[in-house]
Amino acid sequence: MVMNIRLFLTSKVWKEDKYYIAYNPELDVASQGKTPEKAQEMLKDAISLFIETAKEMGTLNSILREAGFVKKEKRWVSPVISFAPLEMTV
């Protein structure tokens, strides 16, 4: 039986040269596209491939735990990630 997992993830999108980069900090997965929307779409594809490969290898549960997810009542609860400006003088 194929079991779907619903994950609530975050993404950060920024422009580098001609492309937009979309990054997911929970799973440390990134992708790119010519528009922010395309970068997000490609990130979803990259995360799907990452999750499917982890399922096939039998490592998904440990990857999710390591990323801060907690399994509660047969579903994975996302870690709380916050982004805030950080000003530094170095």
Image: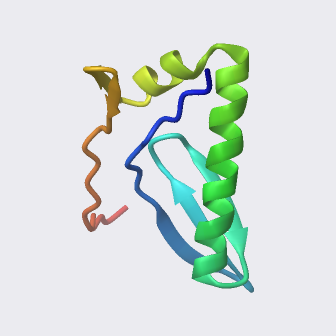
Q: Quadrant of the C terminus?
A: bottom left
Q: Name the residue at 47% across, 48% down.
A: 25
Q: In this picture, is 52 found above or below 55?
A: below
Q: Name the residue at 65% across, 13% down.
A: 58
Q: Is residue 78 left or right of residue 12?
A: left
Give 75 or 65, whichever is nearer the viewer: 75
Q: Name the residue at 67% across, 38% down.
A: 50
Count of marks, rendered view: 0
Q: Position of residue 3 (x, y in %)?
A: 54, 28
Colour mapping used in the image: rainbow
Q: Position of residue 12 (x, y in %)?
A: 47, 65
Q: Position of residue 68 (x, y in %)?
A: 35, 29
Q: Quadrant of residue 59?
A: top right
Q: Name the residue at 43% across, 30% down.
A: 67
Q: Position of residue 49 (x, y in %)?
A: 71, 42
Q: Quadrant of residue 41?
A: bottom right
Q: In this picture, is 51 found above or below 23?
A: above
Give 28 or 75, whichever is nearer the viewer: 75
Residue 74 seen: yes
Q: Is residue 22 left or right of residue 65?
A: right
Residue 21 seen: no
Q: In this picture, is 11 found above or below 7?
A: below
Q: Quadrant of the N terminus?
A: top right
